[in-house]
Amino acid sequence: MWMVAYLFLGFWSAYRILVFSDISAKRGLPGLAVAGLFVGRLGEAAGTLGASFLTGAPLIVASGVVFALVIALFFSLYQKIYSPTINAEEMEKQRLLEYASRFKLSPREQEIFNLIVQGMSNTEIATALFITESTVKFHAGNIFKKTGLSSRSALIADFKLRNKS
């Protein structure tokens, strides 16, 4: 039994350190990490005290309930903190795809368009896609014709203007 408790407390301690450190770094509040770790240590002390009063089946039931609550809290907090970054990446891909389909860009032109919007040069695009620089220039010219724009900066500005969040 003590081994299960040790593993659980070890998981909870590592989880708490990672979550509070990550949240405090993202929000620029280093005191939040310290306060969170302190509250966590108080929780461990309260749990240890509670475990000394409970024995046998009540201890197992209480431990199971607390474990289930911690797991539920972990997943809800994880989704709240990390899912928005995943969604932002997916939204950017969707915006690129919508812009490319609006002007009927070919699949290769879409690849080149995506890299142009990222600010890559013709040489960098050629290297990334394993094609020649003249092929990149050819496709970039087709993109400019289809969009009615004449430069990379105009293309990037048009993309950003049409896709304001």
Image (tube, rainbow, N blue to C red):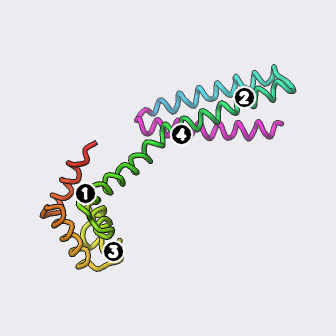
Tell me the amino acid under the disc marked 3: Thr
- Dividing the picture into quadrants, the one containing residue 121 is bottom left
The amino acid beneath tag 1 is Arg
Percent position of residue 21, x then y? 51, 38
**Viewer-nearest of discs 3 and 2:** 2
Q: Which residue is drawn at 65% across and 25% down?
A: 43
Q: Cα distance, mark 1 to mark 3?
A: 27 Å
**Dot 2 corresponds to which residue?**
65
Q: Earlier in the sequence, mark 1 or mark 3?
A: 1
Please rate how many residues cluster around mark 2, counting C-alpha atoms within 10 Å: few if below 14, some from 14 to 19, many from 20: few
First reached walking from the N terminus: tag 4 or tag 2: 2
> Is residue 19 shown in magenta?
yes
Q: In this view, does 25 lie to the left or right of 165?
A: right
**CA–CA distance between discs 4 and 3?**
37 Å
Residue at point 70% right, 29% down? 66
Q: In this view, does 79 lie above or below 44?
A: below
* Badge 1 element: helix
* Residue located beneath label 4 in the image: 78
Q: Are marks 1 and 4 in contact (CB under 8 Å)?
A: no
Residue neighbourhood size for the residue with mark 1, other residues' Cα within 10 Å, grouped as few (<14), some (14–19), many (≥20): few
Closer to the eye: label 2 or 1 = 1
Q: How far apart are marks 3 and 2 (CA)?
A: 55 Å
CA separation, marks 2 and 1?
53 Å
Mark 3 highlights which residue?
A: 127
Which residues, given as a range, are shown in magenta?
A: 1-29
Picture layout, residue 155 above or below residue 22: below
Q: What amino acid type is highlighted by mark number 2?
A: Val
Q: In this view, does 91 lie above or below 36?
A: below
